[in-house]
Image (tube, rainbow, N blue to C red):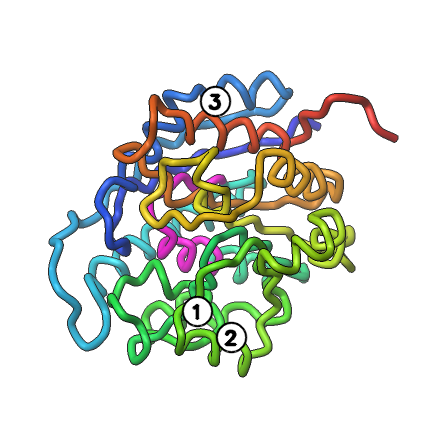
Amino acid sequence: MIQAVSLIGAPTDIGAGTRGAGMGPEALRVADIVARLELLGLSVADRGNLSGPPNPWQQPVDGYRHLPEVIAWNRLVFEAVAEELAAGAIPLLMGGDHSLAIGSISAVARHCRDNGLALRVIWLDAHADFNTDRLTPSGNLHGMPVACLSGNGPDPLVAMAGRVPAVDRQAIHEIGIRSVDAGEKRLVLEAGLTVHDMRSIDELGMREVMARALAGVGPQTHLHLSFDVDFLDPEIAPGVGTAVRGGPNYREAQLCMEMIADTGQLGSMDLMELNPALDVRNRTAELAVDLIESLFGKSTLLRP
């Protein structure tokens, strides 16, 4: 059976503190994402771009920047992802900033609940994204999606999946973390969030970290990958708005994707925070598509 993949463009930087992520979907298309996935035998449909409110570029109100617009964009993402899941396709959300993962994963969580599937979320990121309105230094909602999905945030975002929390915290595994705000550290600890930071990767190796993150994934698991491109070291991926030194290198990132592919359970994904305005000749978009190829099964050898 040929696997169907649906590309959904979400061209907005509404939740970010730096402009430019809204151009991410087009950069991925320029990097030939459709043709490169089709060469792997996938049936790829590019659904075009969602159309939501423009970025007003205003100061925070009650701890949140652009909250009405972020809610509107996430509702659009929720409906688009839910439609593709219902049709049996793998939705691939092309961002756009990482606040849009709230709508994406909320749709996935509802789909899993309705179909009796266990949800596992692999969150590749330099940041924990567990901030709240009381702790955030900026009010940017791209720093809050994991908190919202865990039940801590504005009601329209927290309740989008029809259940609070949308995702059990034990189902979320964060990998590559190396920048966490001071107050956010305490929240992460108190919540018992599973975080494999860069020290863990240095001490254990990426293979062991991924093995732990994927432990227990089986035929009744829906695996969702939320991939913030700033997960990668900025030496190889400069096209991001919140770069943090000391991230995974090319081979470590490839191993992440290969091990996810090996499970055979990938059901949906987000590719977020690609910022062409800060990239060098589309280098980061090319790398992102290279990694996505591995995620969908491209490999050097045939493995048993």
Is label 2 in contact with label 3 (beta carbons under 8 Å)? no
Q: CA distance from mark 3 to mark 1?
A: 33 Å
Q: Position of residue 152 (x, y in %)?
A: 41, 77
Residue pushed farthest right? 304
Foreground pick, 42 / 225: 225
Residue to which mark 1 is pinned: 130
Q: CA distance from mark 2 to mark 1?
A: 7 Å
Q: CA distance from mark 2 to mark 3?
A: 37 Å
Residue 240 position by quadrant = top left
Residue 61 position by quadrant = bottom left
Most common SS among magenta residues: helix
Residue to which mark 2 is pinned: 188
Q: Position of residue 195 (x, y in %)?
A: 59, 65
Q: Is residue 249 left or right of residue 284?
A: right
| Residue for point 64% across, 51% down | 223
Circle 1 SS class: loop
Q: Position of residue 58 (x, y in %)?
A: 11, 60
Q: In the rendered structure, which disc, 3 or 1, sits on the residue that comes first in sequence?
A: 3
Circle 3 SS class: helix
Query: Quadrant where the N terminus lies?
Result: top right
Q: Residues within 10 Å of mark 3 (few under 14, many from 20)?
A: many
Q: In the rendered structure, which disc, 2 or 3, sits on the residue that comes first in sequence?
A: 3
Q: Which residues are magenta?
A: 92-106
- Residue kind at label 2, given as amino acid type: Val
Question: Visible in this render: residue 220?
Answer: no
